[in-house]
Amino acid sequence: MKKRLGDYLLALVIILALNFILPRLMPGEPITAIYGDALVEMTAEMEAYLLERYGLDRPLGEQFMVYLGNLARGDLGYSFYFRAPVSEVLANALPWTLLLVGTSLVTAAVLGIIWGVESGWRRGQKFDRLSLSAALFLNGIPGFVLAILLLLALGFYGQWFPLSGGTSPFPGHSAMARAVDILWHLFLPALTLTLAQLPRNFLLMRSTFLGVIKEPYVLTARSKGIKERMIRYRHCLRSALPPVVTRLGMSIGLLFTGVLFVEVVFAYPGLGHLFYLALQHHDYPTVHGCLLLITVCVLVFNLLADLISIKLDPRLKEDAHQLLG
Amino acid sequence: MIRRAAFFLALFVLLLSVLVACTNDPSPGSPQEDSAANAEPYIIGDRQGDWGYPSPYSAYPRGPGYLRMYYIFDTLIWKDDSGFVGALAEEYNFDPENLSYTFNLREDVTWHDGTAFSADDVIFTFNYLREHPMPVADISIIEEVSKLDQYTVKITLERPYAAFLNNLAGVVPVLPEHTWSGVEQPEEFAGPEAVIGTGPYRLKNYSREQGRYHYQAFPDYYLGTPLVDELLMIKVGDPQMALQSGDVDFAQIEPEAVEILEQKGFLVESGTHDWCLKLMINHREEPLSKVEFRRSLALAIDLDELVARALRGHGLPGSPGLVSPDSRWYCREIAPYGFNHREAVEKLETMGYSFSDGILKDEAGEQLSLELITHADFAREAEIVGRQLSELGIDLNVRSMERSVVDSYIRNWDFDLAISGHGAVGGDPETLQRFMVGEASPHLNARYQDEKLIEALKHQSRALDEDERGKAVCEVQRLHAEAVPAYPLYYPTWYYAHNERVEWFFTKDGIGTGTPIPLNKLALVEQE
């Protein structure tokens, strides 16, 4: 386990260096990107002032050392574009992303697993055939099209859910009223993201489940007269879960930034749009902050996925021991 | 198993919701509980939402960013639909001999925190700007700012500057000395103190992540009581839907939605065409350095087709003098190049090129090859222009890339042709300078260092008589049209829809330096 933690630490250090270098390799530079076609008198003096102000007039090596020094003190820097401390910018956006990504990830995982198990158990039957067709159809719809369809059907025409935003302008005074308002606004974006992930979870779960139900111990369990539901969810599911859990862990990074289309269609707050704007404007401190945050989240979730997989299948622990000598 | 999973799922969602609700929501619970008719909040929808904290140094350097700041901060003078009106200065006069403006300030103005406003704040502001340049206002033209008495200030200029009222007196937000005097890093100055102004509205809440601004009327506003007590600017995904659902009262809309929204009873308005898309030309490199060659390109581009196909007719074809045709500074004597393929070919042939079998060859017999760069937003325009220029026999390669990359290539003269755009072509003609000559904003600027053009621009800048200035601006446009250092392609029409609760108007020469949005704060003030 210590070796594994060491690997994660090494990965973090390498990623830190890459986080610093990669945004700077993009063609273009921040002053032009931020001020662009702005209504400003961008004189040479003003440009020199801004370069000095943002520390961009220093050599790259010095900028890197300053970045590492600040990071060691927990200071993520000051955003060129958002004109606020990066930690503040990220802290305000992160809860919304966690809420949206977390809700849809858990919902899509739970539903995908149950759907995959039930469909796999009934392999070749009408339910399985219909499920497979539905999943493939759903998988073929681009995420943003799905978002617009849901927005039109349930938001605009149905008027059951709000069209945009994370909260209403006036959500109510009590904490409960605010929580209900947040959930009401969350529904459509989370539904979109859930439906976008669901088919993949279903397909993976179904295929691994089909491999598991052929195992002799399933036949043994049946012959012992154990209830079918118990066999499905106690015996088979446990063996079929590790690949699904691994996939969920790996999808976290993509989900953090891949929710951009949901954030745009539903004008929902979050990290995706923030990261996009930071990249677009060469806002290096915010890009560093976003990448660092995503890196940490991916590492943590992958570690969690590893731990869950080991918990689910103790054989993996032995494999890991053998692998690490 | 299913029950347990559902339980954990519900618990997870609930916990996170409460987390967000508790830590991250500055929204008020409900509109002000007031029985007055104007207590109903007025909501303005916007696709981007966040334009920065509405403080002078924190607002994003774009029209909508400054506009949000100007609801809180006032300037010495302001503009309405017919021109300059008094703001913090009740009246002003100009002494041409000494090149000085004297501003008589209002005596009934208080800052939002109750402190009295005086000439000291104006003096402080201009001094502060010298130490801490503000991108929206270049005050280098000001020689001296002096206090004549508690409510009179005199601003002396280094040279005659016709745009002083539009670009400085009507743009510099006056800061309260008592809160800003100790601020060393104005860009990092945030919080309630950074938004104490004298404007008609106070900032009640701002949420960057939600792209939401909540303003509260300032009842002691010196120009009159604001018409609505609560003003919100919020981020919306689709402005058309938001209007029809009653979520917002005002929004900029897509041209395709004009008819539908008019049928639904919304008032749809469009203002002057102050944004220009233009073909940037690298006039430093052969063969684009030859003016006849550039004119041939202009003749080969069908601007009407471009407007019809790229804008679906919602725009005006470019004027070679850069100023848009509905600006009061537009020079009607300048004829457009017009689309004339035959004339374009003839011009090229007189330069030694030969055109046969649809291929344009130079004197060495090689086909002329050029590259046109653009960013994704204008890929369609680039394709149309590229096809039109290809019909001239040029081997034209269209490359689409990220916006800042295009800007960098233009800036470094590392391009042949590029598509780029900017606003402020309908505002004060002083802005023409930064799009034609010099080195400012190089990615938007033709940087055509022609002596006659530079002289004409200087002349218009110094001409204090409006008629004389009009002639000088006309000369600037004529020289630009003749030399074609860049070729204006079109001016898109922008539409705004609202439910007429507020009588918005378009500001003469645009808000501030030239923002052509009808959200002038004076429309919300019941002037006494």
Image (cartoon, rainbow, N blue to C red):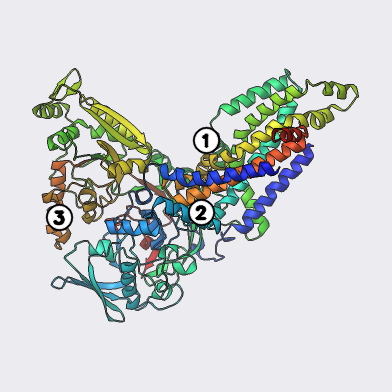
Residue in the picture at 52% in, 36% down: A148
- Quarter assignment of residue B356: top left
Asked if marks 3 and 1 touch (Cβ < 8 Å), the reply is no
Q: Is residue B455 left or right of residue B501?
A: left
Q: Looking at the picture, do discs 3 and 1 lie on one chain? A: no
Q: Quadrant of residue A298?
A: top right
Q: Quadrant of the C terminus of chain B?
A: bottom left
**Which residue extends farthest front?**
A325
In the figure, B333 relative to B392: above or below? Answer: below
Say which chain tag 1 marks. A
Q: Is residue B197 above or below residue B276?
A: below
Q: Secondary structure at mark 2?
A: helix
Label 1 with label 2: CB-CB less than 8 Å = no
Of residues A257 and B342, the one nearer the viewer is: A257
**C-alpha span from label 3 to label 1:** 50 Å
Q: Residue at x 72, y 45 (%)?
A: B10
> Badge 1: few (under 14), some or many (20 or more) residues near its Cα, within 10 Å?
some
| Residue on which the image places disc 2 | A68
* Residue picked out by circle 3: B470
Q: Residue beneath label 1, please? A: A144
Q: Is residue A317 visible?
A: yes
Secondary structure beneath dot 1 equals helix
Q: Amino acid at mark 2?
A: Leu
Rendered position, A134 above or below A324: above
Q: Secondary structure at mark 3?
A: helix
The quadrant where residue B464 appears:
bottom left
Q: Amino acid at mark 1?
A: Phe
